[in-house]
Image (cartoon, helix red, strand yellow):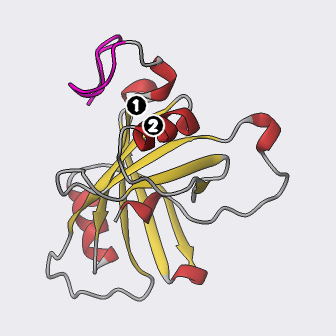
Amino acid sequence: IWLREGAPASPRAPAATSSRARPRRLDHVVVATDDHAAALALYRDALGLRLALDRRFPERGLRILFLQAGEGDRRVTLEVAGPIDARGGGAGTDRFGGLAWRADDVEAWRERLASEGFPVSALRRGFKPGTRVATVTARTAGVPTLLIGDVPDDDAPDGDAPRGGASGAR
């Protein structure tokens, strides 16, 4: 999904809104799972998506698979997240978990949405090193929505472990 350059992000977005305070593209789609093996059998083995990362976050009891298709600006990422010990027995229990939108300036975008009355969480570190995220907590038509952007170079601490993150969209 791509947003047309110069088109407002929503009918209510003011025409003068900086393009940096809007989404640039869909970063990834989140799917919640109770069975990582079944998810891999479907998304990687049957559909042919490339497994880019399989990572566990013990402090949150979470395992996340990142699968991709395409390359460069045409790459699509699927984040499959569930409990570390999830063993659904292949029951096909995956469900939609949300959308993560990428912006050039996530702080400006978050501030704009908040000024328009959208409840938005504070910025926090994303699971992916070098990213910051915020969650739109209501008024999303039932679609869990995450804002994601890069940490400005002057704000990036050396060796800082990521926390918060992409699965916060749920």
Q: Is residue 169 left or right of residue 45?
A: right
The percent position of residue 156, horizontal first and vertical second, equals 78, 45
Inter-mark Cα distance, 1 to 2? 6 Å
User: Residue flagged by tag 2: what amino acid is it?
Assistant: Arg
Marked residue nearer the N-terminal end (1 or 2): 1
The residue that appears at 19% across and 81% down in the rendered structure is 90
Residue 134 vs residue 6: left or right? right
Q: Is residue 74 above or below residue 130?
A: above
- How many other residues sit within 10 Å of disc 2, few (<14), some (14-19) or many (≥20)? many
Q: Residues within 10 Å of mark 1 (few under 14, many from 20)?
A: many
User: Is disc 1 in contact with disc 2, using a CB cutoff of under 8 Å?
Assistant: yes
- Residue named by callout 2: 102
Outermost residue toward the left? 91
Q: Secondary structure at mark 2?
A: strand
Quadrant occupied by the C terminus: bottom left
Image-based side of 140 in relation to 15, left or right: left
Query: What amino acid is at disc 1?
Result: Pro
Residue at 35% from the left image edge and 45% from the top image edge: 117
Residue where numbered disc 1 is placed: 23
Q: How many numbered marks are there?
A: 2
Asked if residue 44 can be seen in this view, the reply is: no
Question: Going 24% across and 86% down the picture, which residue do you hit?
Answer: 88
> Which quadrant of the view contains residue 116?
top left
The structure residue drawn at horizontal position 17% and vertical position 51%, both measured from the top left corner, is 141
Q: Is 10 within the magenta?
A: yes
Residue 112, x across and y down, in percent: 45, 34
Above or below residue 102? Residue 2 is above
Q: Main secondary structure of the magenta part?
A: loop
Q: Which residues are magenta?
A: 1-15
Labelled disc at residue 51: none
